[in-house]
């Protein structure tokens, strides 16, 4: 018998380790925890750990504070993909073991149900969410339940003390998790130990502690008091920009409680006496069947539940934030090759394309590759009402020199997604460029308390101390050279700035008037006119500013726009400054016209034109979308 | 079992001893010996020097901004003193010693003598001196904590009440309690935090106003802007406005807030009825910032000519010409009658846009904000505090000496009229902080000091703004949970609202239930 038990334990442990290993590898290779840590503009209230006593002082005295403290400390390591993946895999493994222990204690034998936690954990990351505090809270709650089940055999006054102390500790550590603790332990006492008195004490503690501590003493609202750390609070529900992603989290809690209760019920009402084991063959069959169900479930989820849109959004956002332009374009190429044009939907496409266009500019490819991907006029400045967009938009405005607009977008982003290091970095740079050093110091001091950003912030703080003009900083010098001075100020109603690309056009026109050498403004404006097919403005802008820049050759897409413009003029003679139109482009245009003439109408010509000219401006001009796909 | 208990008790005692010894050892209780006296004051932050402090205020903890290995501070008055042994450059003053020291020396001076140890040598800086007032400050200060944002619906914010005699800060209401949204425009009736109003804006639950009286709450289906209680507590006058924010493409102040249209109305909680009067809902003017005189006989408010008619033109072409006058209208509470409009401080008198009138409880002093243009002082760098003596025959407002280059706004008086609290962006231009200053009998104001907090470096990295400070003598009794429950219940009190927008349109002026 002992041997059988040992063997059983060995295989259970092996299965748990295998699944944890799989989780680690999948998270590492297929999800990439760095991009979740970066946030993609869609992860709200990601925990941040500030070195020093600030975080601890703020949290230690509140119910759930210890878990928040721990989660903020651990979460900072998601900055590194392998560490983040390892943390979640370990969390999943621990959750498995905890559930196994509880199921064992109930003597129900439903061991395969222990994978519930791990599966739902996987689901959360397949949807690119980061409810890490909640995950930690549930793991700790399960641990406390295990400890309670292990050490609560005694009776009498000591037991009462233990129940009250455990419930209070669980509440202090995990807030809402403490309520789950009291519920599970209470039900265990009732069903397994058949002690309604103990059950009543635990359930009462679960009701009384939250109300007294959180509502009466700390003045918190009742929903937070009973569900803090569990994702049910009004705060979480309102501020989560993707409310549907909360569902797996709720399922996690519901499933865990259901699994535990199912175990208890089975343990309470089964006919078999405790300690009497089922036949070995039957157990082996059950073990294999249970694990197979889990394997198929996991495989199915990885195939069909993985949110491809969010993966693209998060990954491109990560590369754009880190300014890894080559990797960004490489990824977008891969994405474009493997997906339909509208695969990501409007928001997803726009988000990815905005980052891609930003990369094109930084790689000097805007006039070459703009139509490699599906474009529309809202893509340049991510002009749409979505809460994801603020920080992405801010980067573009900032690099372009519209620092106030970037500042506005970043402060909005800060409130929508919460404190993020990248937002702080950008705000600090803006305030330094604007010579508002006291404000810059507020953000730099905060960054200095973050482990992975300390060096960056200290560098600037030292620079400020050495020379408050910051004239030696390359980044600040660049921003100052691009930004407008107060005499050029123009006001815009803030709510129009989100989804009206026309306002961006207006602002860039003003910017170019003051800073005619601003290449980014120039190229973005030309691209905007191409995307809106406004060739008159394209040519006017081109003529007015092209003298300020030095291109080896005129980018082909611009040549195509110029050719298209003059092809619609009566005399058809191209009159542009400085750069000639290449013979190759003339020929390219002739070929386009030849194919189009063959069909005489737009619709029938689309397939052949798309095949041969899909990435040209001619095609976009005629059809209003890119023809590469 | 008894042996076990003994072991446990012994272990606890040993642990306590170790912790205490550790603390004492590392606390660096070093006293200065043979200190060299320098002829300058130590640089400290916040800059608590040359100011007047209430004798009942919480300790003014500060950081010494001088590099040294050890720090020591002697806090003294003419009669008494105590030492502060610092673990680092933060000077954390023991609260009990501080309070007894100040209480025993009302009207005297309190000195901070700063000593630092560098390379084994102690130096002493010139003493930092502050005056101790004879008058106490109100025990409580309520304010809104809000980050510098536009989308209030997504923002975490709350109204907090701080006991200024210590560091306790209590949440009165957080927007966590009702699925997010804006909460604003809190105002107390006569410095009594038992009676107050709080505006609620929520995407999920709609707009409403909480009217709180003791532990009773009315959730009124009414969107109140800035408001002021009549001393009788029988009515609240409030502004109705269409607010728009602009973003500037260049310049330090990147945001501006504007009323495209506004007017005043008033709510009678007893009758559950909203009314307005022609005198403050003039279609040719914009009216805002109501403020009752303490005797309730006058309503002061701000009024400016309407300079645009197309509300879709944003920003309006002439918005930088918008300057408000402070005016008043008499009110007879018994008959609910409003009198004629009187100029108090026209824009022409200051050359500025005069905003946010607040009157001291003795009715003598009027403090207001004056900005170059517009209606929202906290988003205007040019906003300064001005004062006018309402008891003099001719009102001659003057700028207070306490202004900075940044925005000053949201001021209020303590119940004994000796203290003013206001929001200022003087530290960095973006984050508003609360400052307190002493107001003497002649209307002179002492150098303001920032609201003391336990961690003297707290405001260096805090990204919340602290706005709308309101003094009160008593703590609010109502709990945040109760307020949250009332809001969440969505059982709003329906009121008869004849007003559907800001300034009445020309076609239907008769729809207003005018009291006149």
Image (cartoon, grey):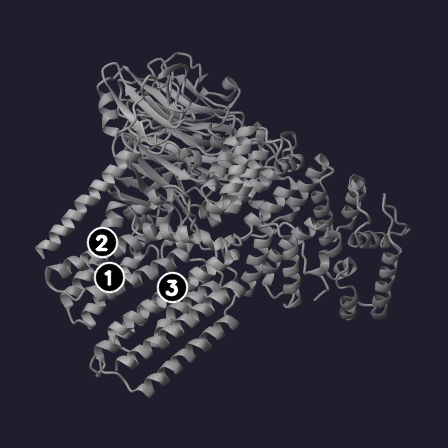
Nearest to the eye among marks 3 and 1: give it: 1
Image height check: is B63 above or below A123?
Answer: above
The residue at the point 59 percent across, 41 percent down is A405
Q: Give the label on residue A209, or none.
A: 2
Dot 3 crowding, Cα within 10 Å, few <14, some 14–19, many 20+: some
* Mark 2 → mark 3, Cα distance in angstroms: 23 Å
In the rendering, at what x and y percent does residue A514 appear? 71, 34
The residue labelled by disc 1 is A182
The quadrant of the rendering that contains the N terminus of chain A is bottom left
Q: Are marks 1 and 2 in contact (CB under 8 Å)?
A: yes
**Residue A484 seen from this side:** yes
Local secondary structure at mark 3: helix
Residue B171 found in image quarter: top left
Mark 1 and mark 2 on one chain: yes
The residue nearer to you, when weighing A346 against B448, is B448
Q: Give the label on residue A250, or none.
A: 3
N-terminal of the pair, mark 1 or mark 2, is 1
Number of numbered markers? 3
Image height check: is B391 above or below A88?
Answer: above
């Amino acid at each position: 018998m002992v041997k059988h038990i040992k063997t059983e334990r060995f295989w259970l442990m092996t299965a748990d380790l295998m699944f944890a290993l799989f989780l680690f590898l999948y998270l590492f290779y297929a999800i990439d925890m760095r991009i979740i840590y970066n946030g993609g503009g869609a992860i709200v209230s990601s925990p941040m750990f500030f070195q020093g006593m600030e975080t601890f002082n703020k949290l230690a005295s509140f119910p759930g504070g210890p878990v928040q403290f721990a989660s903020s400390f651990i979460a900072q390591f998601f900055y590194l993909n392998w560490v983040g993946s390892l943390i979640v895999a370990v969390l999943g493994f621990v959750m498995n073991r905890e559930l196994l222990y509880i199921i064992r204690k109930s003597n129900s034998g439903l061991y395969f149900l222990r994978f519930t936690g791990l599966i739902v954990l996987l689901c959360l990351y397949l949807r690119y969410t980061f409810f890490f505090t909640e995950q930690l809270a549930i793991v700790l709650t399960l641990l406390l339940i295990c400890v309670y089940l292990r050490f609560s055999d005694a009776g009498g006054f000591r037991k009462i003390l233990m129940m009250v102390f455990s419930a209070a500790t669980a509440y202090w550590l995990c807030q809402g998790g403490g309520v789950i603790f009291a519920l599970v332990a209470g039900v265990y006492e009732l069903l397994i130990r058949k002690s309604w008195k103990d059950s009543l004490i635990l359930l009462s503690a679960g009701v009384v502690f939250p109300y007294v501590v959180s509502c009466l003493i700390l003045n918190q609202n009742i929903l937070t008091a009973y569900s803090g750390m569990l994702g049910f609070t009004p705060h979480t529900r309102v501020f989560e920009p993707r409310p549907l992603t909360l569902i797996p989290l709720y399922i996690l809690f519901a499933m865990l409680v259901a699994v535990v209760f199912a175990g208890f019920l089975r343990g309470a009402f089964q006919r078999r006496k405790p300690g009497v084991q089922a036949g070995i063959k039957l157990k082996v069959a059950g073990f294999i069947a249970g694990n197979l169900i889990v394997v198929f479930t996991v495989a199915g989820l990885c195939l069909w539940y993985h949110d491809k849109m969010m993966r693209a959004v998060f990954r491109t956002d990560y590369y754009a934030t880190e300014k890894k332009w080559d990797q960004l374009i490489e990824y977008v190429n891969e994405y474009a090759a493997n997906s339909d044009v509208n695969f990501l939907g409007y928001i997803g496409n726009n988000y990815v394309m905005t980052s891609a266009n930003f990369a094109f500019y930084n790689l000097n490819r805007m006039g070459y590759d703009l139509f490699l991907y599906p474009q529309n006029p809202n893509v340049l400045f991510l002009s749409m009402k979505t809460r994801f967009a603020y920080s992405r938009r801010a980067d573009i405005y900032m690099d372009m020199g519209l620092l106030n607009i970037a500042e506005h977008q970043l402060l909005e982003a800060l409130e929508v997604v919460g404190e993020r290091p990248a937002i702080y970095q950008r705000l600090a740079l803006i305030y330094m460029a604007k010579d508002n050093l006291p404000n810059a110091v507020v953000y730099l001091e905060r960054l200095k308390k973050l482990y992975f950003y300390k060096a960056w912030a200290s560098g600037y703080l030292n620079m400020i101390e050495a020379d408050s003009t910051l004239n030696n900083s390359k980044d600040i010098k660049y921003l100052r050279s691009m930004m407008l001075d107060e005499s050029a100020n123009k006001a815009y109603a803030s709510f129009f700035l989100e989804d009206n690309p026309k306002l961006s056009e207006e602002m860039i026109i003003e910017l170019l008037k003051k800073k005619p050498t601003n290449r980014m403004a120039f190229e973005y404006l030309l691209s905007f006119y191409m995307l809106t097919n406004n060739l008159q403005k394209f040519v006017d802008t081109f003529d007015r500013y092209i003298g300020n820049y030095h291109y080896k050759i005129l980018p082909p897409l611009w040549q195509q726009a110029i050719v298209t413009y003059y092809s619609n003029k009566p005399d058809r003679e191209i009159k542009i400054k400085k750069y000639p139109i290449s013979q190759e482009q003339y020929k390219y245009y002739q070929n386009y016209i030849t194919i189009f003439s063959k069909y005489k109408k737009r619709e029938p010509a689309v397939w052949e034109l798309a095949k041969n000219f899909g990435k040209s401006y001619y095609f976009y001009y005629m059809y209003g979308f890119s023809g590469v796909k | 079992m008894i042996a076990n208990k003994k072991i446990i008790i012994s272990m606890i005692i040993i642990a306590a001893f170790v912790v205490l010894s550790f603390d004492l050892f590392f606390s660096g209780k070093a006293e200065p010996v043979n200190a060299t006296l320098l002829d300058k004051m130590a640089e400290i932050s916040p800059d608590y020097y040359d100011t007047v402090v209430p004798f009942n205020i919480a300790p003014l903890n500060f950081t010494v901004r001088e590099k040294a290995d050890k720090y020591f501070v002697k806090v003294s008055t003419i009669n008494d003193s105590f030492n502060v042994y610092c673990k680092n450059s933060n000077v954390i003053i023991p609260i009990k010693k501080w309070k007894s020291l100040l209480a025993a020396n009302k009207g005297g001076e309190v000195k901070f003598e700063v000593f630092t140890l560098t390379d084994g040598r102690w130096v002493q800086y010139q003493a930092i001196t502050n005056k101790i007032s004879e008058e106490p400050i109100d025990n409580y200060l309520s304010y809104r904590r809000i980050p510098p944002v536009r989308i209030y619906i997504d923002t975490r914010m709350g109204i907090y009440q701080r006991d200024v005699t210590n560091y306790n800060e209590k949440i009165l209401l957080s927007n966590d309690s009702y699925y997010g949204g804006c909460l604003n425009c809190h105002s107390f009736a006569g410095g009594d935090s038992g009676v107050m109003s709080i505006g609620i804006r929520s995407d999920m639950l709609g707009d409403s106003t909480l009217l709180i009286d003791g532990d009773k709450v009315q959730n009124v289906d009414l969107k109140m802007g800035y408001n002021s209680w009549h001393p009788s507590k029988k009515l609240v006058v409030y502004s109705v406005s269409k607010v728009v924010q602009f973003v500037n493409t260049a310049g330090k102040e990147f945001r501006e807030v504007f009323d495209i249209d506004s007017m005043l109305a008033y709510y009678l909680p007893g009758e559950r009825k909203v009314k307005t009067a022609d005198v403050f809902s003039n279609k040719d003017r914009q009216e805002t910032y109501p403020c009752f005189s303490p005797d309730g006989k006058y309503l002061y408010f701000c009024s400016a000519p309407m300079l645009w008619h197309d509300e879709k033109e944003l920003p309006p072409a002439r918005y930088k010409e918008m300057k408000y006058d402070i005016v008043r209208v008499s009110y007879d509470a018994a008959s609910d009658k409003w009198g004629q409009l009187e100029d108090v401080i026209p824009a022409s008198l200051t050359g500025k846009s005069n905003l946010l009138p607040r009157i001291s409880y003795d009715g003598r002093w009027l403090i207001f904000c004056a900005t170059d243009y517009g209606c929202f002082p906290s988003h205007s760098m040019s906003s300064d505090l001005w004062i006018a003596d309402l008891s003099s025959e001719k009102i001659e407002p003057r700028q207070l000496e306490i202004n900075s280059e940044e925005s000053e706004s949201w001021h209020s008086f303590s119940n004994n009229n000796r203290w003013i609290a206001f929001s200022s962006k003087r530290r960095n231009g973006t984050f508003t902080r609360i400052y307190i200053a002493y107001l003497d009998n002649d209307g002179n104001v002492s150098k303001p000091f920032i609201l003391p907090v336990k961690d003297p470096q707290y405001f260096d990295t805090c990204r919340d703004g602290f706005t709308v400070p309101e003094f009160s003598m008593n703590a609010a009794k109502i709990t945040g949970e109760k307020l949250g429950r009332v809001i969440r219940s969505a059982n709003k009190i329906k009121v008869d609202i004849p007003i559907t927008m800001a300034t009445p349109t020309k076609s239907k002026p008769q729809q207003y239930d005018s009291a006149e």
